Image (cartoon, rainbow, N blue to C red):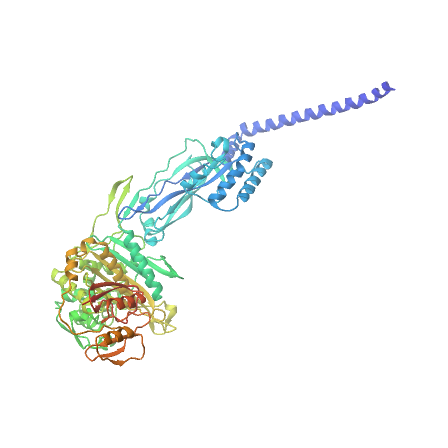
Amino acid sequence: MSKDKDKKTAPIKSSIRIRVQILYLLMVFLGLGILARVLYIQYGPNGDDYRAQGERKSIKLFRTEGMRGDIYSRDMELIATSQKFYMVGIDFGIDKFNTATWKKNLPVLSRQLASMFGGSADKYSNDLSRSFNIYKRDSTPRYVRVTPRWVSQRERDKVLGFAQLNLKPNVGGRNYEDKIERVQPFGELAARTIGRTSPNVVSIDDPQGGSKKYSAYDVRPMYGLELSFNDYLQGTAGWEMRQKINNKFWAPVESPYNVEPQDGSDVITTLDMEIQDIAESVLSAQILKMNADWGCVAVMEVATGELRAIANLTPYGERCREDNNYIIGGRFEPGSTFKLASLMTLIELGGYELDQKVITKSPARIGKRKAAYEDTHPKDTMTVLEMFAESSNVGFVRSVRDEFKDTPEKYLDFLESLGLKDTLGTGVRGEAKPVMWSPKDGARYWQHDLTLNQMAYGYGFEISPLHTLTLYNAVANGGKMVRPRLVTAISRFGEIIEEFPVEYINTKICSDETIEKLRQCMEGVVDSGTGSALRNPYYKVAAKTGTARMAFPADERAAGDAYMNKSGARQYLATMVGYFPADNPKYSIIVCFKANNRKCPNYYGAGLAGPVFKAVADRLYAKHVEWQPSVEQKIKSDTIVHTPAPAHIKHGMYDDVHYAAKELDQKLIYNTSNDAWVKVDNKTQEITDATIGEGKVPNVVGMGAKDALYLMEKAGLKVLFEGRGVVTRQSVTAGSYAAGQTVVLTLK
């Protein structure tokens, strides 16, 4: 029975054996075929091409950027620099990666990441564990990012001390990516002037000589010093061969084609970040308080033309930011601040004297077109000094027309010699070129009965605020018109490799006699004219106010009036420009605002720009110890000389005044409607109401220091006292709008 069974199973075993042998032979032949195909692909006629394709997909040259040069302030404070940021990760595919070690370290690593970056340790653990399990199943991705964001070098070094990441790279699998970003340590201070960069992708040739084009990441400067001095800052790019680990990560490998990048050079500017901070903080507060459309400030050192601060701010909600460089790139009709140039021509070319009388009757029709010109002052005649101090439009139009109506070229040629028809050559991209017409341009641009009249008081042409500041700075500098500077030198590895010295646009814009007269006129503006709010007992200021109408875009204009929109609103350029200390000028300052009369409560140069000018000047004065009086001088000025005097009751609170009168046994005449603040006429013994306007500078003359300080600070003003006793004078006019300025109160 068993023999019969063996006979039956023998053929079955033989059949299976044959099938296995056939299958084995088939596998051998298939393997040999695959091997032959591999050898054919690699070493056949197209082998070189196939190998090159494989290398291009797994090994690739990357362009590496050199560190961009730094930008420094005048005090060598870093204001723009390049900084590397890192993304730390783990490569699960390394040869010595140990699963048991990984599972042991994962809970600790997760807690450390949660402690440093926030979030849940369980989430870090689950995400990393899931990535590892996916890799074990599919062999991809090999590399996973551990940090949730890009980190600084200090943060990277801390992360590399965490569990698993503190192992050697070929054991723990740690690795990291890096990128270079541009940062500004002072935040938004001078952001528009310093400039910005952005990532950029460029197409470049294969450094190995192939036909392939490479896409490389580059830095594209957008504006400001970053763009203007990019040739110095950008450095030279290099090359690095890298091998593909996964779609997100390429590891560097040794290659003869690797080239080290070269870092860029450093730019040393004239900016003083303390002055910049002062300018921006004061400007921002005034813009938001007065609801202006935008504002700008520039501070220049008189002797060198070095710009210590440039602030350009536009309001966005409850804060301001820089989005346009109005100082350098803006171009506007300057208005009354241009009267300094007209006055210079009248004195230098026309021989005008400061006590010479000029007809200023308003309104006046001057010229064949009979265009009307008006002023707010009531005088029919003024001296030249008064005409400038009171900013008489009629006086300047009449004087310039009388002197140059037959020879306008003389007037225009003189303006050209002042650098008012060309760019200033600051080296900053986007600098505005003035627009100024002449009879040579034809009747379309030069109207003989109108254009010269308009130019006399700052209309009919456009210049930048920096042009205006440069002109005033030249008067402060004794007639030397120095070219404005923002950069003084280029350095590399701490060594100066190029310098930009002081340059002059015109070494003598007019005679010394004319300069002296112009200075007297500018000081007259502050002493008795439209700029009296700048007057203070500590230092003298020479300045000029300007309130120029600004034209609307063509599609917004009212019919027949470029300076009014369709809703009847007007917009103005409110300016204050000048220098201080007037007797020995150190700084020149310009402040400009664009304001709409429907939104801004005070759109005049004195009321809107003046407080900012004064606040900046006060802070600059406080910075210079050498300008402060000595202790002996202060003691002498504070000494009180006691002399017999009749009883005197100060202005103040009603209750205090009533009590003082009772104690002094004085009978007063009460003529008040409230029991708040009152003033006392010590001659007539009458008490009347003291009006304290909301949001305006109060009248504290006649009050004691305590009451005056209370009212001024309540209005948001800062107070400086001079002397002791009763307030006899306040530096800011009562009733003007309070804008956070400093008020000097003189007490006697």
Query: Left of 712 or right of it: where is 556?
Result: right
Residue 275 x %, y %: 27, 54
Position of 64 compared to 546: left or right?
right
Lateral position of residue 37 relative to residue 169, left or right: right
- Relative to the observer, which residue lies in front, 600 or 518? 600
Q: Nearer the viewer, residue 86 or 654?
A: 654
Quadrant of the rendering where the N terminus is positioned? top right
* Residue 712 in sight in this render: yes
Q: Which of 214/504 is in front?
A: 504
Q: How many marks?
A: 0
* 540 lies left or right of 549: left
Residue 167 spot, x, y in % from top left? 48, 32
| Residue found farthest to the top | 3
* On screen, residue 134 above or below 3: below
Q: Quadrant of residue 262?
A: top left
Q: Residue at x 56, y 39 (%)?
A: 129
Q: Nearer the viewer, residue 172 or 350?
A: 172
In the rendered image, residue 489, in percent from the top left (x then y), is placed at: 25, 45
Q: Is residue 53 above or below residue 551?
A: above
Q: Position of residue 391 (x, y in %)?
A: 22, 70
Q: Quadrant of the C terminus?
A: bottom left
Residue 444 visible from this viewpoint: no
